[in-house]
Image (cartoon, helix red, strand yellow):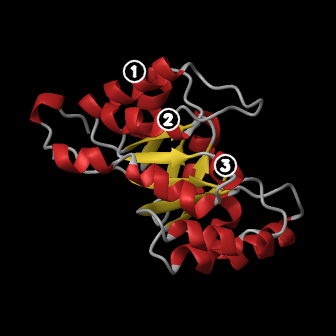
């Protein structure tokens, strides 16, 4: 699973990973989401759903699935591994190691299982050993608290140098995008601040993508 950083090939440009706000009405966000996906190289969308009964959750996810998947991106549900197959999603993101381990039997091997909320290096390694398709660093907890950005960069740099399993660096603002890319994150998660940007989500995603352009020149 692991390899030494000195033997790693040159890093490709990171791809984007969009994180939606908690969606209650899919029709209210589908046009904005679709437009945002066209302005950057979006690999995946983490769909967060507002609390509701299972039927409503499934209906919401099914409405937004084609908006995401028809543009070649993976649809990941925030939690809710039990409905992933029912709505045709590509996988789920779990917010801590315990939830991740509990969901593995439902998701693997057919679907993506990602893990965030990793408080320690040990938790990250446990997720990797258990079969995580990626790990995420820097995502906020349920109280919207995050580690210091310096700590996030340190964790991303450590992971990128040692492990082959991809890592997602969570950008809490546009100014965090380039540093996370430079630290070695294979994917940059754009928090739901993208959808609150006064210039609109599409232009905000385009700006985030432009922050990655120097990586191309560096090879």
Q: CA distance from mark 2 to mark 3?
A: 15 Å
Q: Look at mark 1 in the image and give the residue it sits on.
A: 154
Give the quarter of the image for residue 52: bottom right
> Which circle, 2 or 3, is nearer the viewer?
2
Give SS at disc 3.
helix
Q: CA distance from mark 3 to mark 1?
A: 23 Å
In the rendered image, which quarter contains the N terminus? top left
Q: Nearer the viewer, residue 126 or 27?
A: 27
View extreme (front): residue: 199
Percent position (x, y) of residue 201? 62, 59
Q: Look at mark 3 in the image and give the residue it sits on.
A: 192
In terms of sequence position, does the residue under pointer 1 or pointer 2 come before the other?
A: 1
| Residue plotted at (55% across, 51% down) | 104
Q: Which mark is residue 175?
A: 2
| Residue plotted at (77% across, 29% down) | 143
Against 59, is 218 above or below?
above
| Residue plotted at (84% across, 63% down) | 24
Observer able to see residue 76: no
Q: CA distance from mark 1 to mark 2?
A: 17 Å
Left or right side of 114 for 15: left
């Amino acid at each position: 699973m692991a390899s030494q950083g000195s033997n790693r090939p040159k890093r490709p440009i990171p791809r984007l990973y969009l994180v939606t706000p908690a969606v209650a009405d899919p029709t209210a966000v589908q046009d904005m989401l679709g437009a945002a996906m066209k302005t950057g190289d979006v690999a995946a969308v983490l769909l967060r759903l507002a609390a509701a009964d299972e039927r409503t959750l499934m209906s919401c996810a099914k409405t937004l699935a084609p908006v995401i998947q028809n543009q070649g991106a993976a649809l990941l549900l925030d939690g809710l591994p039990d409905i992933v197959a029912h709505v045709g999603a590509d996988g789920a993101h779990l917010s801590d190691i315990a939830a991740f381990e509990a969901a593995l039997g439902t998701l693997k091997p057919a679907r993506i299982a990602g893990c965030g909320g990793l408080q320690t290096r040990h938790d990250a390694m446990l997720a990797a050993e258990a079969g995580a398709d990626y790990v995420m660093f820097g995502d906020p907890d349920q109280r919207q608290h995050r580690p210091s950005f310096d700590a996030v960069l340190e964790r991303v740099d450590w992971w990128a140098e040692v492990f082959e399993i991809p890592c997602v660096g969570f950008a809490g603002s546009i100014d965090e995008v380039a540093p996370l890319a430079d630290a070695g994150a294979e994917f940059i998660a754009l928090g739901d601040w993208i959808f609150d940007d006064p210039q609109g989500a599409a232009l905000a995603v385009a700006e985030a993508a432009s922050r990655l352009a120097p990586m191309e020149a560096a090879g």
